[in-house]
Amino acid sequence: MIFAIEEINNSTELLPGISLGYKMYDTCSSIARSVQAALALANGNEVVFAQSETLCTRPAQVQAIMGETSSSPCMAVATVIGPFNIPEISPFATCACLSDKTKYPSFLRTIPSDYYQSRALAQLVKHFGWTWVGAISSNDDYGNNGMATFTETAQQLGICLDYSVSFIRTDPPNKILNIIQMIKQSTSKVIVAFLSFLDLDVLMYQFSEHKLTGYQWVGSEGWIFDSQTAEMDQHHILDGAIGLAIPKAHVSGMREFILDVKPLNSSGAEMFTEFWETLFSCKLKYSKSSAENQKECTGHEDLSGLQHSFTDMSLMPIFNNVYKGVYAVAHALHNMLGCNETCNYKVQLDPFVILKHLRKIHFKTKEGDEVYFNENGDPPAKYEIINWQPRENGIVDFVTVGLYDASLPVNKQLSLQHRSLIWVQNSKQVPVSVCSEKCPPGTRKVLQKGKPVCCYDCIRCAEGEISNITDSITCVKCPTESWSNERRDACVKKEAEFLSYEEMMGALLTAASLFGTCMTAVVAFIFFRYRKTPIVRANNSELSFLLLFSLTLCFLCSLTFIGRPSEWSCMLRHTAFGITFVLCISCVLGKTMVVLMAFRASLPGSNVMKWFGPTQQRLSVLVFTLIQVIICILWLTISPPFPFKNFKVIKDKIILECALGSTLGFWAVLGYIGVLATFCFILAFLARKLPDNFNEAKFITFSMLIFCAVWITFIPAYVSSPGKFSVAVEIFAILASSFGLLTCIFIPKCYIILLRPEKNSKKNMMGKGSSKTF
């Protein structure tokens, strides 16, 4: 303050021709002494402790009071001098309560309100993901109000307090022990300390005794930048602490001024004598101190080589606040007196008018710092974020790792340099302090009974419900059955599944179908090429060609089962399959009956062949096939097959399939095919031993045996196969039975036609001989 006043008095631009005077009081942080000094100043009968050498030309009426540095004394002083409208400017009282202009109308300050600091601390805690913290505060206006705002903001940000205790350095030891016990029992690993450095020093002593280490400390400006607290922390309890501090400051000329202090030539020699003796642990000759066994001071000791908070300028931010406060009063007086080159000395000085001008001032210091007060008498809220980083020699560095500026948008107020942070126990990893881990997507939070909202259990979402965000409190149902919740963390649209041409199974079945079609065409070509040979002409070549045609249709109808089901494909696949297979079996049945009738006709007096000639054979095939056509027409008319989305077989997929419509119609089609095949098999089995060098009934029996075996095993396989695999089973049954008929009936004939032409004669075909049985 003295430095600022002397600088102003020597200035020709600010208050030219006017010198400011001052009175200094040491209240020892006592509320009573603070109020006593304030009343003395207000009444004009103060006790002079330090008086300037320049005589005042006006009555010694106080125009403004600089101080106090603590919130509680400031509240008391502001209450007392409020009715007198005497401005009080504090450089270090931060309680948010002092912003209430209805209670403290004449109070201003050059340090931000704890309203901003408490909110900044809560944002800092939230930034690192600490949702479960403990809190300790000073049991005074500074700590209680600051912690109240922190608690309110923390709740809004989703932060819970495991415990919150207040403490003052005059509390009995058992209260400190209770605090220590509470911390040990807590599951929180972060402690938010809204304390003055004096209260923290008492706590540190007890914490050291109980070796209470391993906790991450978050501090307010009351202690985070205090070098004496760092020196006392011999057990490294506070290493890695992080907190808010007043921004570092530099005032040119102030360090040199402070280091030039001498106890013998300074005003107020009594106070400086005490200060000098404490600083150098010595005793001046003229001192009234009762201390003994101390070396004698000369009063000319060198301050520049001394390691002390007074000389290392760690208190410069506070000095700068005092400096700005003095200049604020000077600018208010400058404006009030209408100073330009000279000032109007006739203006009657009035503290209330000075207060009005103080609220309006807006200027920059010589270092470029803006000084102004808002409607609550507070300056702009800016803080440095300080991190305690111990060095190898045990000294703690206060490293600036970020900034907080309340004037910026909320999402930009906090800026941090994460790489440069050191945490508790010299760790580079951010400590974890949560009551419960985050509930991942697919689960919901269920609060633990009797615990804060930060303590919960994670319960998986029920079937058919999802949660797609972290820490969800509810699970919601998927919008439709077309959505899957297998992971329970998102409604993912279900993938439609059907037997397609692109997948491996569909491609193989398609290839087998086309191969069977080509193979049938080759056989038909061979038969047509050798249509006049005995082996082709025998047993009604017309039925053979019709059978080959129906087999081609059987192979091709399997393709209707592959691909995305549609209304037409669903109706076509089952009806085409039923009709073509009945046509095929009807042809085989006709050939079997021809074999039987041919040998019956060879008996003497038999004329059976006239009843089963070519016309009757064609008619039997037509009638057998027409019956299946009628069954299919009735099926399609009454309840046809239709495309259907099956959501139940596989939870995370939609099975696109053809619903049968009428189950009775489907099994009627299959049943009719089964009746014809069984009848054909019986007839062929009876004709297997008829004498002939080439008895076709044997091969028909083999083909029907394969056919029946395939379709008997098809039924349980079809019923038990899920989704597209049931379609694949049906296609496989169609292809297997078709290949069985083609191979057993036609391949032996092709063998003789192509490789054994000598046997392809009427004489050989009709030759008698013992025939093999099976």
Image (spheres, rainbow, N blue to C red):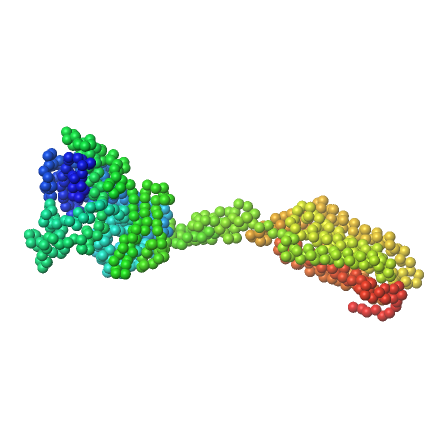
**Quarter residue 732 falls in:** bottom right
At horizontal 30% and vertical 49% (from top left) the residue drawn is 385
Identify the residue at the far bottom of this view: 770
From this viewpoint, is residue 738 visible? no
Residue 473 image position (x, y, % from top left): 43, 48
Quadrant of residue 251 within the rendered picture = top left
Is residue 290 toward the left or the right of residue 214 in the image? left
Q: Residue at x 78, y 50 (%)?
A: 627
In the rendered image, residue 685, in percent from the top left (x then y), is placed at: 80, 63
Q: Is residue 731 left or right of residue 67?
A: right
Q: Is residue 486 left or right of residue 254?
A: right
Please give the count of numbered marks on the rendered protein: 0
Residue at figure coordinates x 16%, y 39% from the top left: 9
- Please name the residue shown 27% across and 37% down the image: 374
Q: Quadrant of the N terminus?
A: top left
In front of the other: 137 or 680: 137
Quadrant of the frame with the C terminus: bottom right
Q: Identify the residue at the far right of this view.
A: 605
Q: Position of residue 393 (x, y in %)?
A: 25, 61
Percent of width and height locating residue 114: 27, 44
Question: Is residue 415 toward the left or the right of residue 670 in the image?
Answer: left
Residue 358's place in the image compared with 221, above or below, is above
Residue 305 seen in the current view: yes
Between 469 and 343, which is closer to the camera in this rendering? 343
Give the residue furthest to the left.
286
